[in-house]
């Protein structure tokens, strides 16, 4: 029989990390690239009278969690912050091993855990917002944080140690053997995570950041990525990403079949730079969607570039528009550039894919075949219009990614 020997790793007196590191995962939700892998963090909190496991792990790596719990004879509570399977998927196995353990969850999570994992209602202990649970010198307080990431989500405040167990909130997809991460180390991965996962929920995120910030945590222990040693820096950044104004940054995301749209995109990027507007330019045939999401967190203007395929936009441009519409970035302006051979409705089709964005649509620039002198002039005019809009809005400089 295979033996896996893994041990809990202490982060405070009576508090240990018992998660797993997924070094090789490269895709989440069959959509989101994970260039740096990820981790599924679970934590063990041992009071004088009771022991709680805070979150579990993705079911594909449940062996690692169970191995790390090998020396733990009793678990009384399994805190389920979030019913999504990457955190709750191993709950049934934990309940099998610890037959008296109860799952602590929000009222909305309880039926979801039944639907997704077959967790019986009578194994659950539903907690209201603000409710506390005394483990004996370790007091857990459960704070409902709806829509960070799902409607049933909560976080847990461990009062005596000033640790906020935050699940997806303040997380990042970053596989590392280091338990702790300072903000400079994790910031880029955290921004990618915010852009991909949390940006569509920005108003709820902002509300919940403001709430948990008041607790002045000493550590934030998320369920993805390292434990954060600078909670205020992380919360300040998350507050800005969620509710701060857009920046003086344009995203130019394009696809080109025979080079005409690429020439337009490059010309526009150059013209914008001359006008003082920094640009992130993306060729959608090779773009990492996470990098695009990071740029969309800040962008004041989104420009989509597409050739006309038959009568509509190229499917990659349509896909990017669909994704931007799902992610709901805070951009205030958008437009389309592109080339066509004999006509079509690419602009109308792309603009129609962005109903969620609260943007002013600037005049598009379309050309027939290769861009001619007049088309390049029109792109310079578009660059000037974007620069003027950004100036009028008072957008500050990009924050460096
Ligand atoms: Fe990491 Fe929403 O699950």
Image (tube, rainbow, N blue to C red):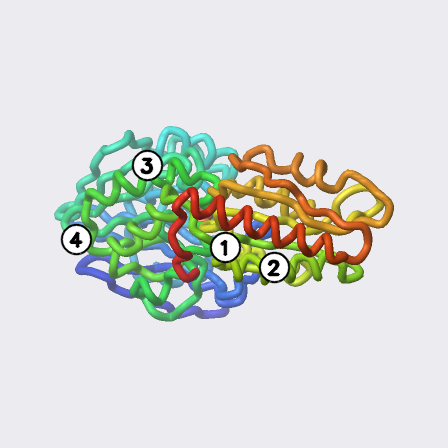
Label 4 sits on a secondary structure element that is loop
Q: Percent from the top left, x then y, of residue 292?
A: 55, 55
| Residue 38 numbered tag | none
In space, the residues marked 3 and 4 are separated at their CA atoms by 24 Å
Q: Which residue is label 3 attached to?
A: 207
Q: Residues within 10 Å of mark 4 (few under 14, many from 20)?
A: some
Q: Are marks 2 and 1 in contact (CB under 8 Å)?
A: yes
In space, the residues marked 3 and 2 are separated at their CA atoms by 32 Å
| Residue 295 numbered tag | 1
Q: Nearer the viewer, residue 338 or 391?
A: 391
Residue 66 in view here: no
Q: Quadrant of the C terminus?
A: bottom left
In space, the residues marked 1 and 3 are separated at their CA atoms by 23 Å
Q: Percent from the top left, x then y, of residue 93?
A: 45, 49
Instruction: Name the side, left or right, on which 61 lies relative to 145.
Output: right
Give residue 400's quadrant in the image: bottom left
Q: Residues within 10 Å of mark 3 (few under 14, many from 20)?
A: some
Label 2 sits on a secondary structure element that is strand
Q: Which residue is label 4 attached to?
A: 161
Q: Given this view, does label 3 or label 4 mark the residue nearer the observer?
A: 3
Q: Residues within 10 Å of mark 1 (few under 14, many from 20)?
A: many
**Earlier residue among tags 4 and 2:** 4
**Earlier residue among tags 1 and 3:** 3
Q: Are marks 3 and 2 in contact (CB under 8 Å)?
A: no
Q: Which residue is label 2 attached to?
A: 282
């Amino acid at each position: 029989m295979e033996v896996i020997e893994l041990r809990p790793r202490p982060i405070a007196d009576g508090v240990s990390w018992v998660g797993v590191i997924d070094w090789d995962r490269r895709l989440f939700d069959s959509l989101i690239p994970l260039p740096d892998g990820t981790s599924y963090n679970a934590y063990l909190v041992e009071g004088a009278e009771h022991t709680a496991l805070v979150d579990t792990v993705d079911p594909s790596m449940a062996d690692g969690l169970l191995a790390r719990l090998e020396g733990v004879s009793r678990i009384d509570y399994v805190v389920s912050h979030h019913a999504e399977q990457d955190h709750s998927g191993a709950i049934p196995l934990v309940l099998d091993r610890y037959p008296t353990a109860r799952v602590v969850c929000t009222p909305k999570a309880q039926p979801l855990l039944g639907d997704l994992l077959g967790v019986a209602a009578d194994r659950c202990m539903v907690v209201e917002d603000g409710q506390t649970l005394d483990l004996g010198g370790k007091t857990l307080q459960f704070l409902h944080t709806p829509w960070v990431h799902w409607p049933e989500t909560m976080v847990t405040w461990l009062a005596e140690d000033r640790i906020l167990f935050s699940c997806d909130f303040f997380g990042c997809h970053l596989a590392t053997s280091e338990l702790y991460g300072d903000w400079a180390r994790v910031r880029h991965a955290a921004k990618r995570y915010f852009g991909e996962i949390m940006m569509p929920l920005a108003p709820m995120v902002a509300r919940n950041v403001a709430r948990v910030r008041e607790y002045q945590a000493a550590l934030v222990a998320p369920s993805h990525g390292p434990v954060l040693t600078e909670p205020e820096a992380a919360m300040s950044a998350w507050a800005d990403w969620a509710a701060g104004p857009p920046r003086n940054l344009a995203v130019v995301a394009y696809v080109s079949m025979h080079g005409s749209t690429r020439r337009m995109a490059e010309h526009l990027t150059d013209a914008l730079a001359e006008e003082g507007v920094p640009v992130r330019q993306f060729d959608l045939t090779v773009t990492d969607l996470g990098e695009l999401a990071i740029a969309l967190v800040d962008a004041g203007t989104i420009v989509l570039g597409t050739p006309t395929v038959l009568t509509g936009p190229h499917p990659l441009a349509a896909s990017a528009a669909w994704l931007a519409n799902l992610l709901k970035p805070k951009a205030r302006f958008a437009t389309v550039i592109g080339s066509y051979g004999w006509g079509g409705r690419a602009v109308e089709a792309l603009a129609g894919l962005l109903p969620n964005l609260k943007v002013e649509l600037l005049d598009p620039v379309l050309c027939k075949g290769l861009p001619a002198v007049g088309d390049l002039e029109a792109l310079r005019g578009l660059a000037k219009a974007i620069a003027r809009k950004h100036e009028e809005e008072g957008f500050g400089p990009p924050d460096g990614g």
